[in-house]
Image (cartoon, rainbow, N blue to C red):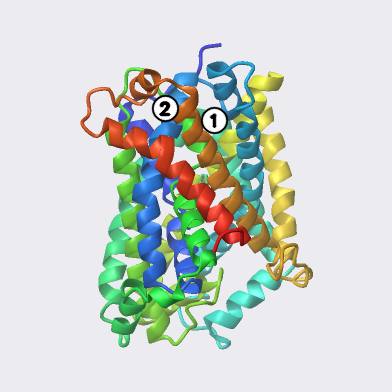
């Protein structure tokens, strides 16, 4: 069977951007920035995106396109009899951990969308949005329904195959979300108290930085760029060898980062205007945004549109996560795309059930330190497995490949910055990642 291919380079770009832009930019970015002190975190995050993230993203695309296979298969294809493919299995493990909680949060977003359709969120509920949200997520059954619906949608897109499903979905909605976010940002900065929110986001307070903040910023850079798991590798593998990678990579990286910053400009003024704690954790956007919508003109329509688009953005990311194990199991066990998507999707659904119950009946369960179930899975996947996956990618391209191979696989042969990139991949990125790990374990101060 011939390998599936993107219909066009634009299709690939949109799908990769669709993967990158999602809950990570809006939901995760704002609460992680909020928990880690704002401005100084933002600078670290930006530094990691440009210094490590974008160069490693190019390396990840290169491996996929050169290997023309899934995460495990691409490494095996390019370095038979070497243990690199183990990094591929790490990516598959991350995909289960991440989609396990991602689909739960996406389910919350779908449920909000529904509440804007039926009118219950048009005005502030008696208990306020905060308590209403807590009530929703601690409920045993309702979130499971919405999480299930989201998983069904994800499975449906993935089982229709690359071109038709994924490409089409990304084309229309991303630009719409971008426009809406910018309009919201403009509104948000006019809120009373907005200045304080902007200062929180943009004025670095260096005293806030410790090893936890550094690791969180690295994890956020990887999570937001869909990096280190093999999603981008798998997408790259559907790209014919004739397409040029570097410009696409930089475009995707910048887009993704701009989305996060604009989302921050929407959220943080509202955090201060409505007197919400910036370190509220995962509920943050679900409490602040409805507050903005409740007081702006046409807010109910804006809210409806926003949660629709957020759910679509989550969907275009979720499909890239599910695609990682689906592509592997299809090749390895000769499963059909249909069977593979449904089987793996259902397993992930049940993982999500555990995550969802972690906000209700199992809220006392804290697998790591004082982190609940969602936070624990997120911590292991985003702060540990993704950077380790990125480390493997950088080392593979930097050391397993010859300079010539690396430059030609990435289309960097003729670009002036080719040795800068290579230097980052060979030395800077691996050293940084290792140092950050050592520091967060407490081995170095
Ligand atoms: N980057 C996606 C987001 O920001 C999430 C994601 C993580 C997708 C890892 C693929 C791999 O929402």
For numbered disc 2, what is the local secondary structure? helix
Image side of residue 156 versus residue 313, left or right = right
Of 44 and 119, nearer the camera is 44
Q: Whole-percent x and y of residue 444? A: 56, 59
Q: In the image, what residue occupies the spot 47% across and 27% down?
A: 399
Circle on res. 62: 2
* Crowdedness near tag 1: few (<14), some (14–19) or many (≥20) residues, C-alpha within 10 Å: some
Circle on res. 308: none
Looking at the image, is 343 positioned above or below residue 243?
below
For numbered disc 1, what is the local secondary structure? loop
Q: In the image, what residue occupies the spot 61% across and 56% down?
A: 378
- Any part of residue 390 in sight: yes
Circle on res. 160: 1
Real-space CA distance between mark 1 and mark 2, rounded to the nearest whole angstrom: 26 Å
Of the numbered discs 1 and 2, the one sitting upstream in the chain is: 2
Q: Whole-percent x and y of residue 183? A: 27, 66
* Crowdedness near tag 2: few (<14), some (14–19) or many (≥20) residues, C-alpha within 10 Å: many
The C terminus - image quarter: bottom right
Q: In the image, what residue occupies the spot 52% across and 55% down?
A: 436
The N terminus - image quarter: top right
Q: Whole-percent x and y of residue 370? A: 70, 71
Mark closer to the observer (1, 2): 2
Whether the residues at callouts 1 and 2 have beta carbons within 8 Å, the answer is: no
Furthest toward the top, the residue is 1
């Amino acid at each position: 069977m011939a390998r599936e291919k993107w219909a066009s380079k634009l299709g690939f770009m949109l799908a990769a951007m669709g993967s990158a832009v999602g809950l990570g930019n809006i939901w995760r970015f704002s609460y992680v920035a909020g928990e880690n002190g704002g401005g100084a975190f933002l600078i670290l995050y930006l530094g990691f995106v440009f210094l490590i993230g974008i160069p490693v993203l190019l390396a990840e695309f290169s491996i996929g396109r050169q290997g023309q296979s899934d995460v495990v298969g691409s490494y095996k294809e390019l370095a038979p009899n070497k243990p690199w493919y183990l990094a591929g299995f790490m990516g598959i493990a991350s995909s289960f951990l991440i989609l396990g909680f991602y689909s739960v949060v996406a389910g919350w977003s779908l449920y909000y969308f529904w509440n804007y359709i039926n009118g219950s969120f048009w005005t502030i509920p008696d208990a306020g949005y905060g308590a209403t949200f807590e009530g929703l997520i601690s409920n045993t059954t309702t979130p499971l329904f919405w999480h299930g619906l989201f998983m069904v949608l994800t499975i449906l897109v993935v089982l229709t195959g690359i071109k038709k499903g994924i490409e089409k979905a990304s084309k229309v909605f991303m630009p719409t979300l971008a426009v809406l976010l910018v309009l919201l940002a403009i509104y948000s900065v006019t809120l009373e108290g907005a200045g304080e929110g902007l200062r929180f986001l943009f004025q670095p307070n260096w005293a806030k930085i410790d090893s936890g903040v550094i690791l969180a910023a690295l994890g956020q850079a990887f999570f937001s760029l869909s990096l280190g798991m093999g999603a981008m590798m798998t997408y790259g593998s559907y790209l014919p060898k004739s397409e040029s990678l570097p410009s696409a990579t930089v475009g995707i990286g910048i887009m993704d980062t701009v989305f996060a910053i604009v989302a921050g400009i929407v959220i943080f003024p509202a955090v201060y205007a409505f007197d919400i704690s910036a370190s509220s954790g995962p509920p943050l956007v679900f409490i602040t945004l409805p507050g903005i919508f409740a007081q702006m003109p046409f807010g109910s329509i804006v809210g409806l549109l926003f949660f629709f688009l957020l759910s679509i953005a989550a969907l275009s990311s979720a499909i890239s996560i599910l695609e990682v194990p689906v592509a592997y199991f299809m090749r390895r066990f000769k499963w059909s795309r249909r069977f593979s998507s449904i089987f793996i999707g259902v397993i992930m659904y049940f993982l999500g059930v555990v995550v969802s119950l972690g906000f209700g009946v199992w809220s006392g369960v804290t697998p790591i330190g004082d982190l609940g179930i969602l936070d624990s899975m997120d911590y292991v996947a985003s702060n540990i497995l993704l950077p380790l996956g990125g480390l493997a990618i950088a080392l593979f391209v930097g050391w397993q490949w010859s300079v010539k191979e690396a430059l030609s696989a990435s289309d960097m042969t003729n670009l002036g910055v080719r040795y800068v990139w290579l230097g980052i991949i060979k030395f800077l990125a691996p050293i940084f990642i290792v140092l950050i790990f050592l520091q967060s374990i407490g081995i170095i101060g």
